[in-house]
Image (tube, grey):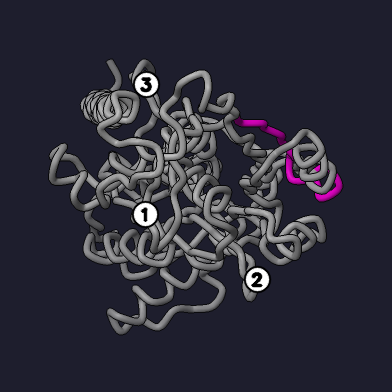
C-alpha cells in the first residue's frame, strides 16, 4: 500500500457515498412520477385539470423541488402533461390508448472536445443519468478541431436533435453553426465555457472562486510566491482561474509579478502535436528562472504530473520543496499507488445534469440564455505542506 493510500480510501468512500446519494434521489423522483401517473390514470387528476403547484407537491411528498421537477419532466416526456411558465402543469392525457400519443423522447445532441478520467467522463455520467428515461443522447467528439466541431454540430442537427449541449474548442471563437442555431431559437447549452456577449445558456464551475481558494490555501501554508500553470488553450475557464489567482494575491496585499503565470503547456490539449518532454523542458526553464516560487496552482491534473516531473528532474520534491494544487483528479478507487494531489474538485456530474435540465427546459418552454454557476470544493491531499525555511 502506497504512502498516500489513506487519502485514496477517503476518495473511494466519498465516491461510493455520492453514488448511493444519486441512487436514492433517482428512487425518489421515480416514486413521485409513478404516484402522479397513477392519479392521472385513475381520474383523480383528469384530462384538462392542473396538477398542484410545485411547492404544494414538495410538501405533499416531502421531497425537494429538483425531485418534483424531474418527475414532472418525465410526465411531460411521456405526453401526459404540458408545462408552461406562469400557467402551471396541465394534464393533457390519461395514458389510455384512445387519448395517449406515442411516447417520443426528445433527442439532445452533445458535442465535446474530448473527455477522460480527469475531466469529461464524469460530466457525461451526470448527463446520461439525468437524461435516463427522459431524452436520447447523441454524442460527438471533436478533439479540439474547429472543422470537426462544425461538422459534429451539423450532424446532430441532421439526426433530429432538438437541443445542443456543447463543450466548445475555444471561448475566443464562436462557431458560426452555433450563431445560426441561436438565430433560429434552437436550444443551446454551453458547458465549461462561455461566449462573451452571446445570449446563450451556459453551465460552468465558479473558476474564479475556486482558483482564489486554492491560491489562498498556499499562502496560508506560508508560501510567499505562488505561480499559476495552465495550458495554452484560449478558454474562459483558464481566464477565470487567472483572475482568481490574481484576486487572492491582491486580497493579501501581495504584488504579483506578471511572469509568475506560465500558460504555455501544449501537450495536454486535445489533438496536441507537442510531446510531453517538450513541455517538461519548458516547465524546467520556468522553474529555474523563478527560484523563489514554492507554491503552484495548476490548471489540470495532467499538467500537475508534468510539473512534478520537471521539479523532480531539478532535484525538488513535492511537498517538501514545492506545494502543488491542481484542478480535478482522476478517481483512484483501485489504484492505491496513484499520487493524490491536493485539488479543486469540480462537480462534473452536477454540470452534466444541469446541462440536460437546461436543454429539456428549453425544448419544453423555449430557448433562454440562463447562466448557471456550479461551486467547487478544495480536497486536501499529499501535495501540499507548510513552507519550511530553506
**Front position in the image: 206 or 1:** 206
Q: Categorize mark 3 by other alpha carbons within 10 Å: few (<14), some (14-19), many (20+).
A: few
Label 1 vs label 3, nearer the camera: 1
Residue on which the image places disc 2: 198
Numbered range of the magenta stretch: 136-148
Residue 219 lies in what quarter of the image?
A: bottom left
Label 2 Cα crowd, 10 Å radius (few <14 / some 14-19 / many 20+): few
Compared with residue 232, is residue 247 higher up or lower down, i.e. above or below? below
Q: State yes or no: residue 144 in magenta.
A: yes
The disc label shown at residue 88, or none: 1
Say whether disc 3 or disc 2 marks the residue closer to the N-terminus. Answer: 2
Q: Is residue 61 visible?
A: yes
Quadrant of image for the N terminus = top left
Residues under numbered marks 3 and 2 in contact, where contact means CB atoms less than 8 Å apart: no
Looking at the image, which residue is at 23% across and 26% down? 24
What secondary structure is found at the residue carrying circle 3?
loop
Which residue in the structure is indicated by mark 3?
337
Under circle 2, the secondary element is loop
| Mark-to-mark CA distance, 1 and 2 | 30 Å
Amino acid at each position: 500500500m502506497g504512502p498516500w493510500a489513506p487519502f485514496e480510501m477517503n476518495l473511494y468512500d466519498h465516491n461510493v457515498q455520492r453514488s448511493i446519494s444519486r441512487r436514492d434521489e433517482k428512487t425518489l423522483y421515480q416514486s413521485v412520477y409513478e404516484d402522479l401517473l397513477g392519479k392521472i390514470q385513475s381520474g383523480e387528476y383528469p384530462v384538462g385539470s392542473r396538477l398542484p403547484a410545485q411547492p404544494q407537491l414538495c410538501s405533499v411528498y416531502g421531497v425537494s423541488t429538483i425531485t418534483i421537477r424531474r418527475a414532472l419532466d418525465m410526465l411531460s416526456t411521456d405526453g401526459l402533461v404540458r408545462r408552461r411558465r406562469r400557467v402551471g402543469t396541465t394534464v393533457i392525457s390519461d395514458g389510455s390508448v384512445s387519448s395517449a400519443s406515442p411516447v417520443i423522447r426528445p433527442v439532445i445532441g452533445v458535442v465535446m472536445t474530448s473527455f477522460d478520467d480527469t475531466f469529461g467522463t464524469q460530466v457525461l455520467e451526470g448527463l446520461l443519468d439525468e437524461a435516463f428515461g427522459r431524452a436520447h443522447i447523441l454524442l460527438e467528439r471533436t478533439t479540439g478541431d474547429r472543422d470537426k466541431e462544425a461538422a459534429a454540430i451539423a450532424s446532430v442537427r441532421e439526426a433530429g436533435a432538438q437541443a445542443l449541449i456543447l463543450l466548445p474548442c475555444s471561448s475566443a471563437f464562436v462557431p458560426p453553426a452555433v450563431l445560426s442555431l441561436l438565430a433560429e431559437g434552437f436550444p443551446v447549452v454551453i458547458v465549461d465555457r462561455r461566449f462573451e456577449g452571446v445570449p446563450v445558456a451556459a453551465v460552468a464551475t465558479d473558476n474564479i472562486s475556486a482558483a482564489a481558494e486554492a491560491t489562498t490555501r498556499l499562502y496560508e501554508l506560508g508560501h510567499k510566491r505562488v505561480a499559476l500553470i495552465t495550458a495554452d488553450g484560449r478558454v474562459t475557464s483558464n481566464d477565470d482561474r487567472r483572475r482568481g489567482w490574481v484576486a487572492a494575491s491582491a486580497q493579501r496585499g501581495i504584488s504579483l509579478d506578471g511572469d509568475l503565470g506560465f500558460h504555455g503547456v501544449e501537450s495536454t490539449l486535445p489533438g496536441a502535436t507537442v510531446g510531453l518532454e517538450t513541455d517538461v523542458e519548458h516547465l524546467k526553464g520556468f522553474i529555474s528562472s523563478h527560484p523563489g516560487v514554492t507554491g503552484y496552482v495548476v490548471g489540470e491534473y495532467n499538467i500537475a504530473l508534468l510539473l512534478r516531473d520537471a521539479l523532480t528532474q531539478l532535484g525538488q520534491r513535492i511537498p517538501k520543496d514545492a506545494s502543488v494544487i491542481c484542478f480535478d483528479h482522476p478517481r483512484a478507487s483501485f489504484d492505491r499507488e496513484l499520487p493524490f494531489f491536493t485539488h479543486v474538485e469540480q462537480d462534473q456530474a452536477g454540470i452534466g445534469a444541469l446541462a440536460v435540465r437546461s436543454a429539456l427546459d428549453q425544448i419544453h418552454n423555449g430557448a433562454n440564455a440562463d447562466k448557471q454557476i456550479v461551486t467547487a470544493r478544495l480536497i486536501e491531499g499529499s501535495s501540499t505542506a507548510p513552507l519550511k525555511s530553506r
